[in-house]
Image (spheres, rainbow, N blue to C red):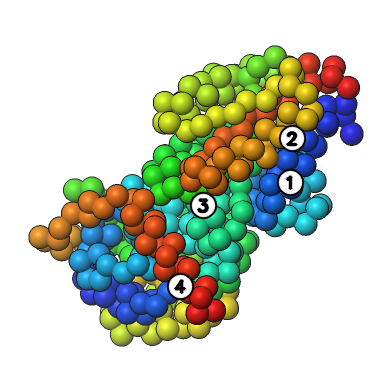
């Protein structure tokens, strides 16, 4: 266990507190610390091959009456945007999307920022609500914001995205 | 078999069950045949009907069907192994295969050189192919009775039914009707 798992654990607790029943996900090594504990705690998970597929799966689950979310990495929003806008947003699907971010401080890939940096602006341009969590937010805020964002998605009947800056070196310094 | 004829048979087979419908001319044609509360028309989410149907089936809403065209299935082809792996109960994927994007000026798809039925079988999905009305009726009957996911590939003629009105409803209204239909199913259940 690395010294930064407090943040991902807080996200897990926030989703459990909300009452998550199902989630679709596209694997990434930095969303895995959220995915695996949820699986271990008995939440049903549904592996998707692409992010738009994950939107469809989670959206179908929500329409079917389940409390469902999508977990993914932010560079996958390029795949997911059309589905988020034309399905989840247009059909009023209350669905949290929890995503780790890339391309900021702590990044080790020379290219990934070229898409990831634009993600908040792209989501804003589509009118999709974004909450951001980073190193200056204490553990309790990570948990309560995750839970509240999921609740907001349900109350306002739309996708709400939570962006997690899990790679930031400041996360490891907060312990 | 014309697409309208295939849609009439699909509508009849799933008239009392959820039906997730791909976008474009097929959605308009289905709505002109019978606009049911159980129909979820995805007006601009090309290639997403199969994934949405899978999610609904994983939520326990089967038996139900999703309809894709060959073009829209090829756009989201990765959903096929996902369906096989997740094994949504009571889910039927119907593929209307005319080897063209009929809604996009009849431009071709690769289905002209790729057998979608063979591809589905190769992935491991139980698949039936039908090229006439009685074959489609029988395949849908089998699929609806199956416990796991099933694919039915229906070979249809190209082109669009003329003079079909546009489907200009607000997606919120379509979604709301569909949710109300699902709620009545809960009441009956």
Which residue is identified by label 2? A143
**Which residue, as the protein is rendered here, is positioned at the far front?**
A155
CB within 8 Å, label 1 to label 2: yes
Which residue is identified by label 4? B184
Quadrant in the picture for the N terminus of chain A: top right
Who comes first in sequence, dot 3 or dot 2?
A: 3
Protein chain holding label 1: A
Asked if residue B138 is positioned above or below residue A15 in the image, the reply reads: below
Residue in the image at 87% along x and 29% along y: A2
Which element carries disc 1, helix, strand or loop?
helix
Quadrant in the picture for the C terminus of chain A: top right
Protein chain holding label 3: A
Protein chain holding label 4: B
Which element carries disc 3, helix, strand or loop?
helix
Which residue is identified by label 1? A17
The alpha-carbon separation of the residues under discs 4 and 3 comes to: 20 Å
């Amino acid at each position: 266990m690395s010294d930064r798992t407090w943040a991902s654990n807080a996200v897990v607790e926030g989703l459990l507190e909300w009452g998550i029943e199902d989630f679709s996900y596209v694997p990434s090594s930095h969303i895995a610390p959220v995915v695996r504990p949820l699986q271990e705690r008995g939440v049903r998970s549904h592996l998707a091959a692409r992010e738009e597929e994950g939107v469809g799966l989670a959206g179908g689950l929500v329409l079917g009456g389940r409390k469902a979310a999508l977990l993914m990495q932010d560079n996958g929003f390029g795949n997911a945007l059309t589905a988020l806008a034309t399905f989840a947003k247009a059909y009023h699907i209350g669905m949290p999307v929890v995503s780790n971010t890339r391309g900021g401080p702590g990044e080790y890939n020379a290219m990934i920022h070229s898409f990831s940096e634009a993600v908040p602006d792209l989501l804003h341009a589509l009118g999709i609500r974004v909450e951001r969590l980073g190193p200056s937010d204490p553990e309790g805020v990570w948990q309560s914001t995750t839970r509240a964002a999921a609740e907001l998605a349900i109350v306002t009947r739309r996708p709400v995205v939570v962006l997690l800056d899990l790679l930031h070196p400041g996360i490891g310094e907060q312990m | 078999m014309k697409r309208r004829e295939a849609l009439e048979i699909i509508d009849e087979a799933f008239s009392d069950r959820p039906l997730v419908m791909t976008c474009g001319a097929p959605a308009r044609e289905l709505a002109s045949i019978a606009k049911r509360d159980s129909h979820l028309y995805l007006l601009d989410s090309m290639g997403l009907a199969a994934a949405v149907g899978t999610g609904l089936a994983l939520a326990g809403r089967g038996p139900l069907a999703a309809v894709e065209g060959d073009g829209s299935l090829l756009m989201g082809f990765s959903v096929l192994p996902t369906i096989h792996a997740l094994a949504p109960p009571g889910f039927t994927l119907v593929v209307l295969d005319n080897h063209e994007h009929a809604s996009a000026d009849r431009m071709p798809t690769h289905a002209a050189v790729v057998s979608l039925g063979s591809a589905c079988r190769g992935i491991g999905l139980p698949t039936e192919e039908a090229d006439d009305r009685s074959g489609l009726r029988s395949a849908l009957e089998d699929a609806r009775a199956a416990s796991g996911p099933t694919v039915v590939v229906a070979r249809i003629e190209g082109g669009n039914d003329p003079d079909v009105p546009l489907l200009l409803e607000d997606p919120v209204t379509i979604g709301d009707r569909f949710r109300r239909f699902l709620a009545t199913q809960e009441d009956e259940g």
